[in-house]
Image (cartoon, rainbow, N blue to C red):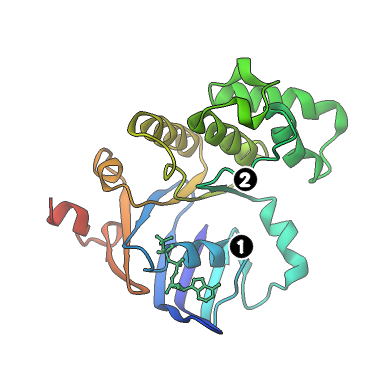
Amino acid sequence: MIRFTDVVKEYAKGGTALTGVSFNVAKGEFAFLTGPSGSGKSTLLKLAYFDEWPTRGEVETCGVRSSAAQRKDVPFLRRKLGIVFQDYRLLPDRTAEQNVAFALEVTGAPQDTIRDRAVRALAQVGLASKGTALPQELSGGERQRVAIARAVVNRPLVLLADEPTGNLDERAARGVLQLLQEINAAGTAVLMATHNLDLVRSVDMRVIELSRGAIAFDSGDGAPPAVERTS
Ligand SMILES: Nc1ncnc2c1ncn2[C@@H]1O[C@H](COP(=O)(O)OP(=O)(O)OP(=O)(O)O)[C@@H](O)[C@H]1O
């Protein structure tokens, strides 16, 4: 579902963010992406959803290859992907239900199915009673659940999450992780960047650890993750 082959990313102003990264996240797999600040986690995710292009090497996500894809192909790819960010990125003047519905409207889903699908997606994330709430009327954990509902309402093959629990307390963070695991169990591959090593240790999932733009450990590759070795 996500394949990086010898990926190097150099920013015009910022030097080398990734120095030669190779890994593969298979269909239906769950993997954490860890590493210190500046190690390249967000860059890796941006490459995976084609917000950035590799300087060298190849990225393939949901069958779309960086060597073949152009900017105009990105909206097509994004329909197969869900993306969740630390700061939720909800539309502030729309209700929870309208935020989720918007993701369906932009893909041209049949109008008569949109409301029903948005309502079901909100129920799936435990927010059936909050459909008419505006983002400002929701807690951080609830906002992130709306963002997750929006990301999965199109039934994506892959869900990319960049620090989805970064603004949440421990309890809300655990709830979000559990939700992402449920989504994964239903067949969506999940790649989740996080600083929260307690959260990573709380479940037995693959860990890909970046250090200075390179993969330091990949527990899916037979090596023990550093978070286990140092605990
Ligand atoms: N748009 C950009 N232009 C120039 N340099 C950038 C850009 N984005 C990131 N970088 C640089 O690339 C490196 C990796 O940054 P990145 O944001 O991917 O790390 P990160 O692991 O996600 O960090 P954090 O955990 O703090 O979010 C850093 O040195 C950063 O300064």
Left or right? Give the position of 139 relative to 73: left
Q: Which residue is drawn at the image coordinates 62% and 15% (left, top)?
A: 129
Eyeballing the image, is 151 above or below 207?
Answer: above
Q: Residues within 10 Å of mark 1 (few under 14, many from 20)?
A: few
Residue matched to label 1: 63
**Percent coordinates x, y for residue 174 in the rendering:** 36, 33
Q: Tell me which amino acid carries mark 2.
A: Arg
Q: Residues within 10 Å of mark 2 (few under 14, many from 20)?
A: few
For this rendering, which residue is in front, 82 or 188? 82
For this rendering, which residue is in front, 131 or 61? 131
The image quadrant that residue 216 belongs to is bottom left
Eyeballing the image, is 175 above or below 106?
Answer: above
Residue matched to label 2: 89
**Percent coordinates x, y for residue 71 in the rendering:** 73, 70
Name, please, the residue furthest toward the right.
Answer: 111
**Percent coordinates x, y for residue 111 in the rendering:** 87, 31
Eyeballing the image, is 57 above or below 176?
Answer: below
Work out whether mark 2 precedes mark 1 in sequence or the reverse, and give the earlier one.
1
Q: CA distance from mark 2 to mark 1?
A: 27 Å
Q: Secondary structure at mark 2?
A: loop
Q: Tell me which amino acid carries mark 1.
A: Gly
Q: Which residue is drawn at the image coordinates 61% and 25% (left, top)?
A: 137
Q: Which residue is drawn at the image coordinates 37% and 74% (left, top)?
A: 213
**Percent coordinates x, y for residue 29 in the rendering:** 42, 48
